[in-house]
Structures are given as C-alpha cells and as structure tokens.
Amino acid sequence: MSEDFRATVVVVGSVNIDHVVTASRFPEPGETILGIEASTGLGGKGANQAVAAALAGAPTTMIARVGADPEGALARDGMAQRGVDVSRVTEVEGASTGSAWITVAQGDNTIIVVSGANFSWPEGDPLSGAERNAGVVLSQLEVPLPVVHAAASAASKADALFVLNAAPASALPDELLALIDVLIVNEHELAVVARTEPDPPEQAHAVLRERGVRAVVTTLGPEGAIVTDFGGVTTRVPAVPAPEVIDTTGAGDAFTGVCAAKLATGTPLPEAARWGCVAGSLAVRAAGAQDSYPDAETLRREATLTTRTSQ
Ligand code: RIB
C-alpha cells in the first residue's frame, strides 16, 4: 500500500561534495599516516536529508546554493536522480560548491566543511512561497543562522512543521528556539543547544521545552533515540542493530530525512523516529552518505523484519 503524502518536505540547507579518506585510525595532531583508500561522494547535511526524505517517498524540494562549477552540477543531478525537486537549487557566480573533508576510521568519522556557496544567500525569505504546500520545513546549521531563522518564520506563518537538525552544534537564540516544532540532535549537540548536561536527555529536553521548543529527539547512535513529543511525553525508541558497521557518515541525516518524511504524512513523532532508526541502521551498512540511503521498499522490508525479530 502506498503512503498518503499530501504535503511536501521543503529542505533549506547545504550541499557539499564529500572527499573521503578511509584509514585504520585517526592521525594525532602533527602526525602523518598512510590511508587505505580515497573516494568522492555527494553530501551536505541538507542535501543528504532531502535525498533520504525523497527516497522514503515524500515529495521533496531542496532550497540551496551551489557554485557555478562542475561540482554544483554533479550535486544537483545526483539529488534529482534520487527524486528531489532541485528547481530551487541556485548557482552562485564566483563561489565554489561546498566541500567536506572526511576521515573514516575505527567505526567513526571526522568532518571538516568548507562552506563556499552554502554561505552566499541573499537577504530575505529563502522559501518565497515554497512553504505553501509544505507539511514540513527542514533545516540544519550548515547555512547562515538568519537563513534558518527566516525559514522557521515562514514555516510558522504557513502552519508547516519546522524541524531543525542543529548540526553542526551551535547555541541558538531563544527567538529561534520558540519557532522550532521538532529539534533533532545527537548528545553532543543537545548539550550545546540546551547549554546543560546532556545526561539524562529527558532533563535537557525539559530545559529546551521551557525555552520554547515544542518537541525534541536525541539520537543515541547504536542506542536508538529518545523522543519528547508535543505533549511532553518521553519515549525511548530502540535501535535497529546493523549486522556490520561500514561507515557512519550521514547516518544522522538518513534518520532526520526519513523522520521528516514520516511527519509529513501525519505520523506521530515517536513512530516517525522509529522509522528514522531503521534508516540510520541501513545507512551505516554501506560506504558514503547519499549512496548508502534506502528506498521506501527497503525501509519497509527492514522495518517489518525488525518488528518480527523484536516480538
Ligand atoms: O552529516 C554528514 C555530512 O556532513 C556529510 O555529507 C558532509 O558533507 C557534512 O555536511
């Protein structure tokens, strides 16, 4: 049975080309080590989340800035091939497409982003009408804060849910927190945004709700996620174990994109987070970010398998 996606997911966010080196361990500062292999892939937290949502079946529009360079064209084409509407991905003359420099080692990764065109936005409302059919407007912190704030205001006026994945972590002003319907963070980001100890997460969630955030999801990697919903009820969402972890890059984006796609169908937040955990688990089983994301059929199959084995 196909799902009823009445509303679109609109992503206002970043587009990067990922340059990945795999190594047996991370180098110490000042140290040179030999890597195992190097590769290039499509990334950027915004683009990754848009692709994850589109592959899950949600009509998805990406609003982003890329350079007028071959990398920008590559990133746009890659998103379009995976079902994302890229008509609002704008080329910026004189700027380079964003790039990310990633080391994958010891089951983890480090990432340095060079923002390039992701930080070249005109003033004003980045959505300019795209929010009209949106069920969810989704953003991250790889674009300037005023752009995120303007997207949140437009979403609120259009009665769309505003979902913020506060990555990379940054302290946020209370005026922005008050516009967030669903905040999605990992434990490190939770501590930075809530300006408090992240453990236990439900206490940090309560701090954020007092400051105006309506609902909070903290992803816990192999431990699943913890969700405090719109009514203030906290639920633990179990992890979906992966038989083998190949590359965790972009797993959080797979979680967020699929969670947003499910919210756009009216799925309750804890259930949407359950789907996010399935997507995150599938994403760590293959190399790269967008290249590792499941389509709707694969998601459904894995979710069914997980439900059966947990009964
Ligand atoms: O979350 C993973 C992403 O972070 C990578 O694709 C990289 O581009 C950075 O934005």
Image (cartoon, rainbow, N blue to C red):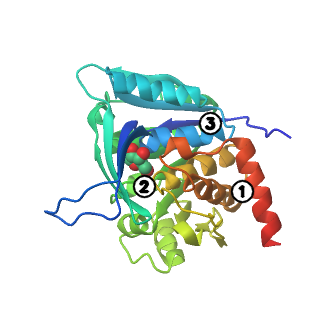
**Residue 160 point in image, percent of width and height:** 60, 41
**Residue 257 point in image, percent of width and height:** 57, 46
Residue shown at 41% from the left, 41% from the top: 44
Q: How crowded is mark 1: few (under 14 residues within 10 Å), some or many (20 or more)?
A: some
Q: What separation in Å lies between label 2 and label 1 (alpha carbons)?
A: 21 Å
Image quarter where the C terminus lies is bottom right
Q: What element carries label 3?
A: helix
Q: What residue type is labelled 2?
A: Ala
Q: Which amino acid does label 3 sit on?
A: Ala
Q: Which mark is residue 268?
A: 1
Q: What residue type is labelled 1?
A: Pro
Which of the two residues, 65 or 107, is positioned nearer the viewer here?
107
* Nearest to viewer (mark 3 / mark 1): 3
Determine whether 210 is above or below 58 in the image: below
Q: What separation in Å lies between label 3 and label 1 (alpha carbons)?
A: 19 Å
**Residue 271 point in image, percent of width and height:** 71, 59
Marks 2 & 1, CB-CB < 8 Å contact: no
Which of the two residues, 29 or 216, is positioned nearer the viewer here?
29
Q: Is mark 1 on a helix, strand or loop?
A: loop
Q: Which mark is residue 147?
A: none
Which tag, 2 or 3, sits closer to the chain's start?
Answer: 3
* Nearest to viewer (mark 2 / mark 3): 3
Residue for badge 3? 54
Residue shown at 43% from the left, 38% from the top: 41
Q: What separation in Å lies between label 2 and label 3 (alpha carbons)?
A: 21 Å
Which of the two residues, 140 or 239, is positioned nearer the viewer here?
239
Q: Quadrant of residue 187?
A: bottom left
Q: How crowded is mark 2: few (under 14 residues within 10 Å), some or many (20 or more)?
A: many
Residue for badge 2? 166
Which tag, 2 or 1, sits closer to the chain's start?
Answer: 2
